Amino acid sequence: MPTLLNKVVESAESLVKSEDYMKVNGLRLVKPYYFDFLCSVKKRWLGKTIIDVFSEEFASRPRSYYQEAFEDGRLRIEGGKGTATADTLLNGNHRMRHFIHRHEPPVLDLPLEVVAETQDLIAVHKPASMPVHACGQYRKNTVMALLQLERPDLGKLFPVHRLDKPVSGLLLIAKTAAAAKAVGTQITEPGAVHKTYIARVLGSFPDDPIAVDRQLAWDSGSNHAFLMEADGSLSHKQSMGRVPEVGQNQKLQAKEAQTGFRLLSVAPDARTSLVECQPKTGRTHQIRVHLSFLGHPIANDSQYGGTYKGPDQVRTYISAARDDTSSHSGPLTSVNATAQAIQSKMTQQDCDSAHQHQTINKRQKCTSEAAFISHHAGEASMSTKCDQGDGGQGSEVKDFDSRNTGTKKPVASNHADLLVPDNLQDDMCMNCPRLIPPGYPTDMQPLWLHAQKYTSATWSFVCFEPEWANAEWTPRLS
């Protein structure tokens, strides 16, 4: 691997290794690593300085950080004529690089299993909490990265479709780009692929099958799917207290959405039901919103009315993390027993590659707020969508006011029991000394929605059911 500032640096092309991971308290964690983001200059950035661009576009860090990062060689301009300075005005021949100490969010330590394989496809059981591909702050804690690590015999793989991060179940992956395109097109064609999901919902679901045909509109600003009326206006019935955050002179775009539902069983305590879901279209959060519309939301889907403990909404936690910084105004120096256990799992190579500049601690110069806001990989969002369970329409984590979430604002975990040992910290890192980026909960739960079966005229794949899909299973009251 290349080196920069005397550190081993990874890029988007770097392969993952087994020693990159740790398993602690039921979580799969990624050891922090140095990563070099690369991006071209967009039209709206022409004529601006690199400091201006990063301060405006990626405001999770203060301007003072970017000024020091440029001086330190972590923020750089490539291409063009002559030697670039902090005052250089960007043009179309330039490319920008940002070298960071990268921390990834955790995922549940659940197995990733190949359940079937054909000449062109593999069918994978995707665990809940894990994104499909690199997006946002996730790169190594993804289905595609772990498949590359655990099944190198499969060669280069291409995702056909995606499942939202908290959703488990059947995921189709192609062995060639041509197969991915063909099957991906087939999945989006109405009636070409029969998709079956199962969900555990609140209440006793009706005995007779139900078909829902209600338009939906996705709002990336609020990270929420809204039910729309027949005339294209917003239905406030299922807004859950949220307000669309579309830009000025924009409006929500209503799209047709149809889902069929059938009762499978009612739990022994009659508080929840197991329901088969058959989406005819593929809108974001379609099953979740249509079940909420019926008055039977997924039982642990708090975003759409569920009342049981389920996946926490990361954006709400990010907001809470900002407000929780007053009690963590400086870098933490103690490493407790858990952190020492983490240190013992790291190799000497890790320690050698993570040595520090023995200079002023630049992290202390940042404001207390910025010091505990995760660098949300805005650079990464330039290239990929993120299959986030809280939306999946973009990888950049934005700031959200908890008043628009429709749920009580949770207290952000500061992960004090998961610290990076002192000798592996980076003195300009906005996440250190915490191993996990601030704002990401560690009390992770799967959403009770599972992709069970996909069938076309020429193939059929089925995935085993999770524990909560057992007819006799009764969830504990939250």
Image (cartoon, grey):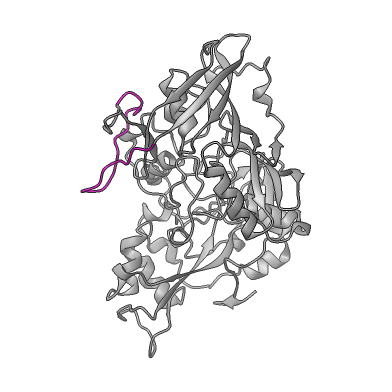
Q: Is residue 478 in sight in this rendering?
A: no
Residue at horizontal 28%, vertical 44%?
Answer: 246
Residue 315 in view, yes or no: yes
Q: In which quarter of the image is residue 445?
A: top right
In this rendering, the answer to whether 155 lies above or below 316 is: below
Above or below, 358 relative to 343: below
Is 245 covered by the magenta stretch?
yes
Q: Residue furthest left?
A: 249
Nearest the eye: 152 or 194: 194
Residue under the point 43% across and 31% down:
303
Depth check, front residue: 200 or 99: 200
Compared to residue 185, the image places residue 317 above or below, namely above
Q: Position of residue 339 (x, y in %)?
A: 63, 49
- Residue 318 relative to residue 244: left or right: right
Q: Where does the magenta region start and end?
A: 236-255
Q: Which image quadrant: the N terminus?
A: bottom right
